[in-house]
Image (tube, grey):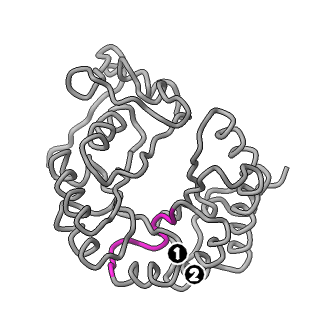
Amino acid sequence: MCIRDRYAEAALKVVGEGYDALKFDPFGIDIDGVWRYPSRNLTSDRAKLAYERIKAVRKAIGEDVDILIEVHGNLGVSSAIQMGKQFEEFHPFFYEEPIDAMNVECMKKVSENVNIPIAAGERLYTRYGFRQYIEKQALDILQPDIGLAGGLTEVKKIADYADTYNIHIQPHNCIGPIATAVAIQLDAAIPNFIIQEWSPYRPSNIYNLVDNPLEHKVKNSYITVPDLPGLGVELVEDAVKKYSTVIKIK
């Protein structure tokens, strides 16, 4: 089976389990099946491979399932625009980090030239790091990571400010059950929430760190916000003790 068809097969598995949206990086794995990020100036073979993967997934899952394209900030501006224009025909839900998010003007150039909602923000910190993106309206969807951007209170402030510009929020998730639980609480408290990232396919030992992993309570792509105290999950001490924590003090 070629790599393109493997993407389609994986997408069908996700949809078969009741999900109506899925995210993947069509650039990350090269033609030999090795995880190797592309160059900023995308080569024609990697460009064609990414296009064919998106095309195969869309054909396999149909038009009613949302495709979210992840790029991990690896492309240069020109390549990001060129690929974004090609991806438009597949109607992606968003185009995530088509370029490195450290330069707002470059991201704005991509946004202005690609007719797909642009998402980014997992590498930005506090409301001050997001301010220029919000005020310049360089992004359609902000993705603050609650664990990096300043916690629940700070990300709530980011979301409220973004709402004054009609910008949506999709909290970035470091793919752990506690991160998911925190994000779900935020989602329920902001008016501009649009979609939540999580992964149901991590090793079981990750989910065993808490007593009530929300990832296992998903039904048809939705999670019910828990009404339990706190975040709705508790650490399982015996599970946590299996992992050592090392703090290096200089």
Residue at 43%, 49% (x, y): give it. 195
Q: How far apart are marks 2 and 1 (CA)?
A: 6 Å
Q: Give the answer, above or below, for where 223 lies relative to 33.
A: above
What label sits on residue 75 in the rendered view? 1
Residue at 15%, 44% (x, y): give it. 249
Q: Mark 2 points at which residue?
A: 79
Taking 113 as reference, is 4 left or right? Answer: right
Residue at 39%, 36% (x, y): give it. 176
Q: Give the answer, above or below, for where 242 lies relative to 169.
A: above
Does dot 1 land on a helix, a strand or a loop? loop
Q: What residue type is labelled 1?
A: Leu
* Label 1 neighbour load within 10 Å: few <14, some 14-19, many 20+: many
Q: Give the answer, above or below, for where 224 lies relative to 221.
A: above
Residue contact between numbered discs 2 and 1, judged by CB atoms under 8 Å = yes
Q: Which amino acid does label 2 sit on?
A: Ser
Q: Which stretch is magenta?
A: 94-104
Q: Is the magenta stretch mostly helix, strand or loop?
A: loop
In the rendered image, residue 240, in percent from the top left (x then y), is placed at 32, 22
* Label 2 neighbour load within 10 Å: few <14, some 14-19, many 20+: many
